[in-house]
Amino acid sequence: MKSIAVEEKVDRLWLDNPWWEEGTAVIPFGDLEPRDYLSPFSALVMQHQPRRSVVLMGPRRVGKTVLIHHLIKQLIGTAGIPADNILYVSVDTPIYTGMPLDIFVNLLRDIANFHSDQPGYCFFDEIQYLKNWEIQLKSLVDTYPNFKFIVSGSAAAALRLKSTESGAGRFTDFLLPPLTFAEFLKFRAVEDELIEEIASDTYAYKCTDIDRLNENFIDYINYGGYPETVFSEEIRANPARFIKSDILDKVLLKDLPSLYGIRDIPELNRLFTTLAYNTGEEVSMGGLTQSSGVNKETVRRYLDYLEAAFLIKRIRRIDKTGKHFQRDRQFKVYLTNPSLRTALFGPVSADHEDMGHLTETAIFAQWFHNQYLTDNINYARWKGGEVDFVGRIFSSPQMQWAVEVKWSDRPYSHPDTVQGLIDFARVNNLEGMPKITTRTRTGQRTIRGTPIEFIPSSIYCYTIGKNMTRNPVAS
């Protein structure tokens, strides 16, 4: 049986790295609008001390490959890195099946006009399909001090687990989330029309037309999490079909079964459908077992897999004093993007009965890039009260902020409807002013001696997403 000739692999490399051609600067996807995450991703890649590889993770279709090519364009243009010192490989290309990573590095130095006095940059896309990639990558980091290695993939569990276990001190994770609401407005070319920055040092913003902003917010909830749904008229005409066939089906039917050996795919689908329909609601293991028809231990494993695939995120419950319960019988599950739900169950309007939970989901999705933040966000519920989001910053043992999310202006005139937030703020002596999001109302009120900030949900959602690429702590 014939094996694939080295010459054919070299030809493919030249095809995938067009910048090697003398006199050309054509970069695939180079004419597309870059995501806001290009700046922090670039800063991480350009950091050569400590010597580490970068593991770019994220859900399907959020633009990881495009982000890589935008960075390559920046390296060649702004940073002045010789084009021959940059390698891009999509590991799942059939012709490369089973090729060790060091072979690619050697080919880069052999077939391109490599400049040994300049650093080299190697990008390995869809790395999870290469067996023992983490061991090979660690070896490359140790062997080639003048190279920066960047790998990417959509299978988070396989990446994060192996990155943590095998790449300790050698790998740095970077998570690319679905589009933030700020990016959605930018790609629609309406951000500058609808948003004004109050002051650059406060990371705060105001809206020039709340009704138009809310219209865009509804569109974001329905289909705004993925760049292609914004740029393609054909996909916008039927975003549900794109999201279901190109994202959900490939994750649920291909990625998870192939990586984790899941055999009962309909069972997994039933559970995910249940979670998607109840995004933002409190659930329990017993309730999920009953509604999905899956036993408790299997439900627990499936939740881990779905979270690892960037489809859901669980948050834990705390009590009125900010303490965790000894046994987590209840928890909340959020989709990582609200359009996953509308893809399954249809679009929503501004007055849809599920807008409250979808607004919560959209706001929570803005924090998704920062794992430290999401790991320190909880919800509070006790007898007589609850708060949607509460959290701490850095290593503080105390809860420091709290937000009650509403898609209604009623709390502004009837603060008794959010008594739980006031009680929680007083008991925990919060550092930050507690917030209540509304549909349109903005302002501050003092209720029972506690100052409360009211801010429209769409502006709050924009603020978090915008600040995730500027100053995460300010979000």
Image: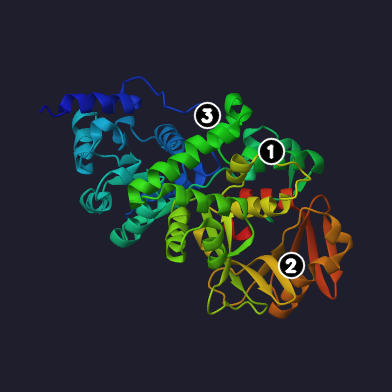
Q: Which residue is drawn at 50% across and 58% down?
A: 293
As drawn, 139 above or below 402: above
Q: Name the residue under label 1.
A: 219
Identity, as a three-letter code, of the amino acid under mark 1 = Asp
Q: How far, Cα to Cα, is label 3 from label 2?
A: 39 Å
Alpha-carbon neighbours of circle 2 within 10 Å: few (<14), some, or many (≥20)?
A: some
Q: Position of residue 404 (x, y in %)?
A: 72, 63
Q: Residue 238 carries which label?
A: none
Q: Name the residue under label 2.
A: 433
Left or right, 460 with respect to 341, comes to right
Query: Looking at the image, which is closer to me, 115 or 345?
Result: 345
- Give the mark nearest the N terminus, 3 or 2: 3
Q: Are marks 1 and 2 in contact (CB under 8 Å)?
A: no
- Give the mark nearest the N terminus, 1 or 2: 1
Q: Mark 3 points at which residue?
A: 32
Query: Looking at the image, which is closer to me, 87 or 12?
Result: 12
